[in-house]
Image (spheres, rainbow, N blue to C red):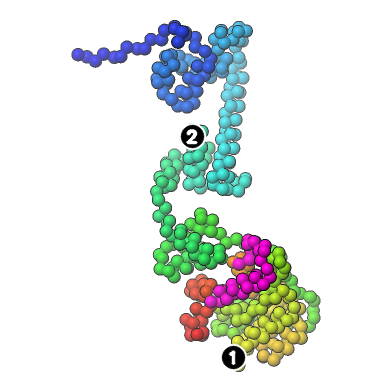
């Protein structure tokens, strides 16, 4: 027998389903079908009115708003005068503008809360992965096409990022080791030196991967610059020529030395460091730490450095024009040891840039962006002295083939 179609549902004028349903029911049906995306047929069967009725209600709502759906019983004052078509278009435009503005606000809010971006971040420069994360948070409130259009993200790119985020992180083990190395070096190493440590451990990985994963895990070496200590007190004695002339290379140890004084200001007081930097490999032959930048600081440091020299070694010592290097005590020690003096031009820090560069690395790796409250002067001097020992013996340098200064000299047979 031929199949018979199910009889079409009839909608009778009963108390449960009156011929003219109330305004609230019509608005609810329109919202469920055309805003929340429910099936029109299912909604029709549930409320007891035909699909055609729901579509008619929607058409009236678009043209006249809620007033177009009102029955006589809903409007005790009588029939409302017909509205102006132009005014309805303006209302719809305003609604669209409000929706767009609210969407932008929600996107910016999630950029701050979820992505931890700075206030005022430009959503147009977000990465596709970041856009996908924001869409995942807001897709229950806004439609997917609207979010994709607002963030200028192709649908295929969105689903690609979703699949990528579902996959396990293939660099999870590597990330753990990078974090361990970063913390082990007291947050001093950037991606290049972390990569060098991984290579020394036999871990095969691209440097680009290290450079990408470290910022993702917030492994950033902070840099906070401050005004440095200035030791220039005028022309105490005649200046000497600049023999080094910014050539900070040496073919052997104890040929060219650089020195200067730098200041560390902590809540407990000020500490001053006076080191010698060897241009051959950056080794620190000697240093002194004090709470006063006086002649005793630099003279005792020079005595320590001279004691490390052999009888046939007479390096050039390059300084700035600070008063410490123009006082009789410094000059007499230089002459007695047969050392050659060299000076930068007044106020020209590039003339001693290799020493300034050491101070910059030192402060980035140990001093800046750390809370020194509660640390005494003696404790800080101990921490600084330990770092300088570590700098000579352990800290790797890419220019030395990922070896420390001491390791490099041992590889050349220049140190035991």
Left or right placement of residue 263 versus residue 3 in this view: right
The local secondary structure at tag 1 comes to loop
Where the N terminus falls, by quadrant? Answer: top left
Q: Nearer the viewer, residue 184 or 27?
A: 184
Specify whether residue 387 is painted magenta. yes
Up/down of 301 relative to 197, above or below: below
Could you give the CA–CA distance between mark 2 and mark 1, rounded to whole angstroms? 77 Å
Residue 28 covered by magenta stretch: no
User: Is mark 2 in CB contact (under 8 Å) with mark 1?
Assistant: no
Which residue is pictured at 53% across the width and 67% down the height? 185
Please, what secondary structure does the residue beneath circle 2 have?
loop
Residue at coordinates 56% horizontally, 35% vertically from top-left?
103
Q: Which residue is mark 2?
A: 140
Mark 2 or mark 1, earlier in chain: 2
Q: Position of residue 328 (x, y in %)?
A: 76, 86
Give the magenta part as a residue range: 366-393
Q: Residue at x 52, y 72 (%)?
A: 396
Task: For label 2, count other residues whose C-alpha is less than 10 Å away and answer few (under 14), some (14-19) or many (20+).
Answer: few
Q: Is residue 148 visible?
A: yes
Q: Which residue is mark 1?
A: 310
Q: Main secondary structure of the magenta part?
A: helix
Q: Is residue 232 above or below residue 123?
A: below
Q: Position of residue 70 (x, y in %)?
A: 55, 12
Q: Quadrant of residue 229?
A: bottom right
Picture quadrant of residue 390:
bottom right
Q: Does residue 316 appear in the picture of this structure?
A: no
Number of numbered markers: 2
Left or right of 393: which side holds 231? Answer: right
Residue, x 61% and y 67% (percent of image)? Answer: 366
For the residue pair 147 and 271, the one nearer the viewer reads as 271
> Residue reaching furthest left?
1
């Amino acid at each position: 027998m031929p199949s018979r179609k199910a009889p079409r549902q009839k909608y009778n004028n009963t108390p449960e389903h009156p011929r003219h349903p109330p305004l609230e029911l019509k608005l609810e049906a329109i919202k469920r079908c055309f805003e929340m995306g429910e099936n029109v047929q299912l909604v029709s069967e549930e409320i007891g009115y035909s699909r055609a009725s729901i579509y008619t209600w929607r058409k009236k709502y678009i043209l006249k708003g809620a007033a177009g759906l009102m029955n006589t019983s809903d409007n005790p004052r009588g029939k409302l005068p017909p509205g102006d078509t132009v005014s309805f278009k303006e209302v719809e435009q305003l609604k669209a503008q409000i929706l767009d503005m609210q969407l932008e606000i929600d996107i910016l809010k999630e950029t701050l809360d979820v992505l931890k971006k700075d206030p005022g971040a430009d959503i147009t420069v977000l990465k596709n992965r970041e856009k996908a994360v924001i869409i995942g948070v807001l897709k229950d409130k806004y439609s997917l096409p609207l979010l994709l259009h607002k963030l200028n993200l192709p649908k295929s790119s969105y689903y690609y990022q979703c699949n990528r985020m579902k996959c396990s992180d293939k660099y999870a083990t590597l990330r753990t080791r990078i974090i361990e190395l970063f913390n082990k070096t007291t947050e001093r190493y950037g991606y290049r030196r972390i990569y060098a440590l991984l290579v020394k451990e036999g871990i095969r990985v691209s440097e680009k991967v290290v450079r990408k994963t470290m910022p993702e895990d917030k492994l950033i070496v902070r840099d906070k610059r401050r005004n440095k200590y200035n030791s220039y007190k005028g022309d105490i004695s005649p200046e000497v020529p600049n023999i080094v002339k910014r050539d900070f290379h040496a073919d052997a140890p104890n040929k060219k030395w650089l020195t200067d004084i730098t200041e560390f200001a902590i809540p407990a007081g000020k500490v001053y460091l006076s080191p010698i930097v060897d241009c051959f490999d950056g080794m620190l032959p000697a240093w002194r730490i004090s709470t006063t930048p006086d002649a005793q600081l630099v003279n005792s440091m020079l005595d320590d450095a001279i004691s490390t020299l052999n009888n046939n070694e007479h390096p050039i010592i390059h300084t700035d024009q600070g008063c410490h290097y123009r006082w009789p005590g410094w000059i007499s020690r230089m002459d007695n040891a047969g050392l050659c003096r060299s000076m930068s031009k007044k106020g020209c820090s590039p003339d001693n840039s290799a020493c300034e560069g050491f101070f910059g690395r030192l402060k980035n790796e140990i001093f800046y962006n750390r809370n020194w409250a509660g640390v005494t002067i003696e404790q800080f001097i101990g921490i600084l002295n330990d770092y300088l020992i570590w700098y000579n013996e352990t800290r790797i340098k890419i220019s030395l083939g990922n070896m420390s200064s001491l390791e490099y000299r041992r590889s050349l047979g220049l140190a035991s």
